[in-house]
Every structure is written in C-alpha cells, then in structure tokens.
Image (cartoon, helix red, strand yellow):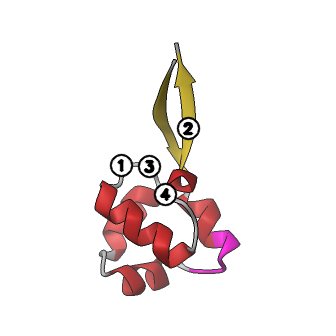
C-alpha cells in the first residue's frame, strides 16, 4: 500500500478557522494568487509552505490534504 496526496483541504480549514485567503496570505507571506492556487488545487504546496500554513492554522501538515491509499 502507498499513501498519496489527494485533494487539498485548505478551503475547508480556512472556513473552520474563520480566516480568509487574504488573511492567510498576510500571515504567511505567500501571495493571494498562490493561496488561491492551493485552495483550488491548481498546484500542490511545497513542504515549507505546508509547514508554515499548518502552523498558522494550528493543524497538522497531514490535515492539509486528503490522503489516499493505493495498492
């Protein structure tokens, strides 16, 4: 079995934290366009970005993506 990264959960986590994409951008230093790309699954986050965002959202890095098992 292998774990792989599924869909980004950032939209859900932002709503849960009552935080806007713009606020996340200000707090992390990532551009609003970059945040939007992650929220809309246009590109995956780097390890550093995921660590920073998890810290700001007070969650685990693993929470940022659905994890999928493949045979």
Q: Quadrant of residue 11?
A: bottom right
Give the CA separation, mark 1 to mark 4.
Answer: 13 Å
Q: Nearer the viewer, mark 1 or mark 4?
A: 4
Reading the chain from its start, which is encountered first: label 2 or label 3? 3
Q: Nearer the viewer, mark 2 or mark 1?
A: 2
Reading the chain from its start, which is encountered first: label 2 or label 1? 1
Check the image and report above or below for 2 versus 23: above
Q: Position of residue 54 (x, y in %)?
A: 49, 67
Reading the chain from its start, which is encountered first: label 4 or label 2? 4
Q: Main secondary structure of the magenta part?
A: loop
Q: Nearer the viewer, mark 3 or mark 4?
A: 4
| Span shown in magenta | 15-19
* Residue picked out by circle 2: 67
* Residue picked out by circle 3: 41
Q: Residue at x 37, y 58 (%)?
A: 37
Q: Is residue 20 left or right of residue 17?
A: left
* Residue picked out by circle 1: 44
Q: Are marks 2 and 1 in contact (CB under 8 Å)?
A: no
Q: Position of residue 21 (x, y in %)?
A: 48, 75
Q: Quadrant of residue 38?
A: bottom left
Q: Are marks 2 and 3 in contact (CB under 8 Å)?
A: no
* Residue picked out by circle 4: 61
Q: Is residue 60 left or right of residue 32?
A: right
Q: Quadrant of residue 26?
A: bottom left
Q: Are marks 1 and 4 in contact (CB under 8 Å)?
A: no
């Amino acid at each position: 079995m292998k774990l792989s990264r599924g869909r980004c959960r950032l939209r859900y986590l932002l709503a849960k934290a009552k935080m806007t994409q713009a606020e996340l951008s200000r707090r992390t230093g990532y551009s609003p366009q970059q945040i939007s790309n992650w929220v809309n699954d246009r590109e995956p986050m780097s390890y550093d970005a995921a660590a920073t965002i998890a810290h700001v959202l007070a969650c685990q890095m693993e929470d940022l993506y659905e994890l999928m098992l493949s045979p």
